[in-house]
Amino acid sequence: MDNITATILEILKYTLPALIVLGSSYLIVQKFLLSQNQRKQLALFQDAQDITLRLRLQAYERLVVFIERISPRQLLPRIYDSSMTVRDLQAAISFSIRAEFEHNLSQQIYVSRNVWETVKNVKEQEINMANQVGKTLNPDAPAKELYSRITDIILKTDEQLPTDMALEIINTEVRTVLTYGAM
């Protein structure tokens, strides 16, 4: 029995430290691999955030360009032709605004609901303004009359124009996104 106990103790003397080293090595390697995996996931997440942030900023830029392009100050000189009638200019205003809007429809997936609703409302307000002013004029009159009336409304209004309000809302959200990153 003494011999068996001595043999068992001799075997334990070599195997027990080996098992402890094996267990410690396993835990260290597992912790290292877990840490590496988390670092890779964090790097991927940051890359995705950077890409998303760039896409969102591009969407805001495109919406700012859209708002600027449908602003009567920009739109009227671009589409006005002296040979047009009030009806023609009114139709050209509606067509241009809708075409610009359709060109930017995909931007809604990158911006907040508030910004997108604002953009849609501005589009409708600009079309409605042209239609309301156009209704007060003879449809076959020269387009210069509609051009002048819309210009007068813009110049004489004390209220903030819808396009200016939309630009403010977009700029505020962009500042928030730049401050806090892609949300």
Image: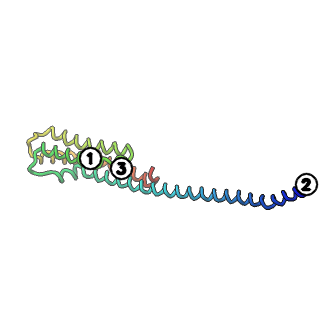
Going from N to C along the chain, the mark reached first, 1 or 2, is 2
Image height of 11 relative to 101, above or below: below
**x and y percent of residue 13 in the render?**
81, 60
Residue at disc 3, secondary structure: helix
Residue at disc 1, secondary structure: helix
Task: Give the label on residue 170, or none.
Answer: 3
**x and y percent of residue 59 in the render?**
35, 52
Nearer the observer: mark 1 or 2; the answer is: 2
Residue visible at 18% across and 50% down in the picture: 76
Residue visible at 26% across and 46% down in the picture: 102
Image height of 84 relative to 42, above or below: above
- CA distance for labels 1 and 2: 93 Å
Disc 3: CA contacts within 10 A as few (<14), some (14-19) or many (>=20):
many
Residue behind mark 1: 102
Name the quadrant containing residue 29. Answer: bottom right
Q: How many marks?
A: 3
Disc 1: CA contacts within 10 A as few (<14), some (14-19) or many (>=20):
few
**x and y percent of residue 127 in the render?**
22, 42
